[in-house]
Image: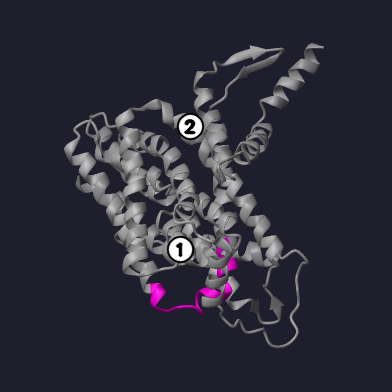
Amino acid sequence: MTAYLAGVVSSLLSFIFIVFAIGTIGYLVGGIKIKGIELGTAGVLLVALIWGVVINFIPTFDFAGVKTITFWSDKIKSNFGIVSNIGTALFVTAVGLIAGPKFFRSFNKSTLAYIVLGFVIIIIGAVTAALFAIFDPNCSSSMAVGLLTGGLTSTPGFSAGKEVAVALDEAAKAAGQVSTLEADVTAGYGIAYTFGVLGVVLFVQIIPKILKVNMADEVAHFQAANQIQIPEPKGKLTQIDPFGFFPFFLAVALGCLIGAIKIPGINFSLGNSGGCLIGGLLVGHFAHIGKIDLRISKQTLNFMRELGLVLFLIGAGVPGGVNFISKFRWTYFIYGAVMTLVPMIVGYIIARYVFKLSILNNLGSITGGMTSTPALGTLIATAGTDEVSAAYAATYPFALVSIVLASKIIIMLI
């Protein structure tokens, strides 16, 4: 009996069980509608964050022969990091492959709008973060960067900030000083991440309702305005596998190589997220290599996109919940919320009144400018078409470059 109980406890507390249990409960929570608004896949994030918070208060224990069960360790932390990275790669590659056939063939006046929005949204957020760091003596520049990257849900920006913080911590240690810059960046990211995700997810659902948008009409107009002739490959092509895994894996591998390229001097790289987006766009655009067919069915891409999104939310959400508690202050939470709301609202106003973008292109560019993977998934579900991912894909790379550079500059100069 004791052995049986030990087996049950071990299974219930296994990493695999926890991941799928979070996904199961998260989809149930996400499916709850209140006045037509639902969290959708972001419900998974909410459950993951709650689990991350809860495990801070569960002590290590020994039960039925299962020795020293620890709910958070370097190994488990690393496992969630792997889940998050795989999820990000799957999601952004699928987005790139979906947008790829039209992306490079659709450059027009709107493209300039996406580029400007990508930079402007991040610049506004960075200036806001810098002001908080300057005027609040309790908010270090590293904490401000953590709050900024959490508020904008930017893993590459977070990684860039941590990289600088680690270097400064090591320099301080070598000089016999104590420095906690890396811990501040991590804690700030965890504190702001929750609102950063949920704020944008709710925004892309609430705005159409406030404006009383007829989504069916908007989608019809959007599709008519974005009709692009995609040439069919000439000659007979060979399909390597029936599900399209070969071209998908090729796009991910290519993306990782692109993301690993560093620009000398500023030590900048796109990382796996930016690289996989570019890899997906390229494979989706060219559609074949010689006689090898690289086209993938929409069903496969939709599946990969959703699977990637849920894995990303679980992998990022649990560590975010753990870090949420460590240095939480209500002032930090408010700062993070401001860093989410101000760039998003200003970006929306500029897109609507300066560039005159349609509501779907507007919100698509906002999700890209805010580097919000979950919000794009919600927008696709709200609009009922994945073509809005084109605006996300056009804005995202410029926002990504901006947030990485901004994170490094704020920590080094403020």
**Residue 107 shown in magenta:** yes
Considering the image in quadrants, where does the N terminus appear? top right
Which amino acid is tagged 2? Gly
Q: Which residue is mark 2?
A: 321
Q: State left or right for residue 402 relative to residue 392.
A: left
Disc 1 secondary structure class? helix
Which label was assigned to residue 180?
A: none
Is 60 or 102 nearer to us in this picture?
102
Q: Nearer the viewer, residue 396 or 74?
A: 396
Q: Position of residue 78 (x, y in %)?
A: 54, 37
> How would you classify the magenta stretch by its main secondary structure?
helix
Q: Quadrant of residue 333?
A: top left
Q: Residue at x 25, y 34 (%)?
A: 139
Image location (x, y in percent) of residue 396: 43, 61
Q: Give the spatial CA distance, label 2 vs label 1.
A: 33 Å
Is 183 placed above or below 42 here?
above
Mark toward the start of the polypeptide (2 vs 1): 2
Examine the image and state in which quarter residue 217 appears. Answer: bottom right
Segment colored magenta? 95-111
List the single residue furthest toward the front: 212
> Which image quarter holds the C terminus?
top left
Q: Is residue 213 one of those drawn in magenta? A: no
Name the amino acid, label 1: Ile
Identify which residue is drawn at 62% across, 84% down: 231
Would residue 244 be found to the left or right of residue 270 on screen? Answer: right
In the visual, does 344 lie left or right of 54? Answer: left
Q: The residue tagged with tag 2: helix, strand or loop?
A: helix
Residue placed furthest toward the right:
1
Q: Is residue 331 above or below residue 103?
A: above
Residue designated by label 1: 359
Q: Position of residue 169 (x, y in %)?
A: 29, 37
Is 312 left or right of 337, judged from the image as shown?
Answer: right
